[in-house]
């Protein structure tokens, strides 16, 4: 009886270890992919990642608003 419980416990521990290793390997692959995307640069401005284009557009809008405030124009 005790051997059966020990066998089931060892099998469960091995299954958890295998799943954990597979998940860790997948996570490392995902991080490597993201590092490649971040390191990727285009020769043309505005052709990069969508988030960078959105941030650039947001910064341009803020500059436009600050210039309008400096000129005394109401938006």
Image (cartoon, rainbow, N blue to C red):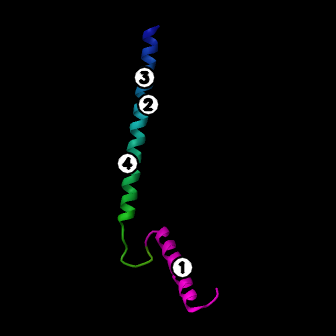
Q: Earlier in the sequence, mark 3 or mark 1?
A: 3
Question: In terms of image quadrants, where is residue 16?
Answer: top left
SS assignment for the magenta stretch, majority? helix
Q: Are marks 1 and 4 in contact (CB under 8 Å)?
A: no
Q: CA distance from mark 3 to mark 1?
A: 59 Å
Residue range (magenta): 48-75
Q: Confirm whether the magenta stretch covers residue 49.
A: yes
Label 3, label 4: how far apart the Cα atoms are: 26 Å
Q: Quick check: 17 left or right of 51?
A: left
Q: Earlier in the sequence, mark 2 or mark 3?
A: 3
Q: Which mark is residue 44?
A: none
Magenta span includes 74 = yes
Q: Nearer the viewer, mark 1 or mark 2?
A: 1
- Report how far apart the C-alphas of labels 4 and 2 lie in the structure: 18 Å
User: Dot 3: what SS?
Assistant: helix
Residue 28: image tag? 4
- Mark 1, Cα crowd under 10 Å, few <14 / some 14-19 / many 20+, is few
Looking at the image, is 38 positioned above or below residue 48? above
Dot 2 falls on a residue whose secondary structure is helix
The percent coordinates of residue 13 (x first, y second) are: 42, 26
Q: Which residue is mark 3?
A: 11
Q: Which residue is mark 2?
A: 16
**Number of residues whose C-alpha sits closer than 10 Å to that of mark 2, classed few (under 14), some (14–19) or many (20 or more):** few
Total tally of numbered discs in the picture: 4
The answer for how far apart the CA atoms under marks 1 and 2 are is 51 Å
The residue located at (57%, 88%) in the rendering is 68
In the picture, measured across the screen, residue 40 lies left or right of residue 75, that is: left
Crowding at dot 4, Cα within 10 Å, few <14 / some 14-19 / many 20+, comes out as: few
């Amino acid at each position: 009886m005790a051997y059966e419980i020990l066998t089931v416990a060892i099998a469960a521990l091995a299954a958890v270890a295998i799943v954990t290793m597979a998940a860790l390997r997948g996570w490392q692959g995902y991080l490597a992919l993201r590092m490649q995307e971040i390191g990727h640069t285009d020769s043309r401005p505005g052709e990069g990642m969508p988030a960078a284009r959105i941030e650039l557009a947001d910064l341009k809008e803020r500059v436009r608003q600050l210039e309008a405030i400096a000129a005394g124009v109401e938006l």
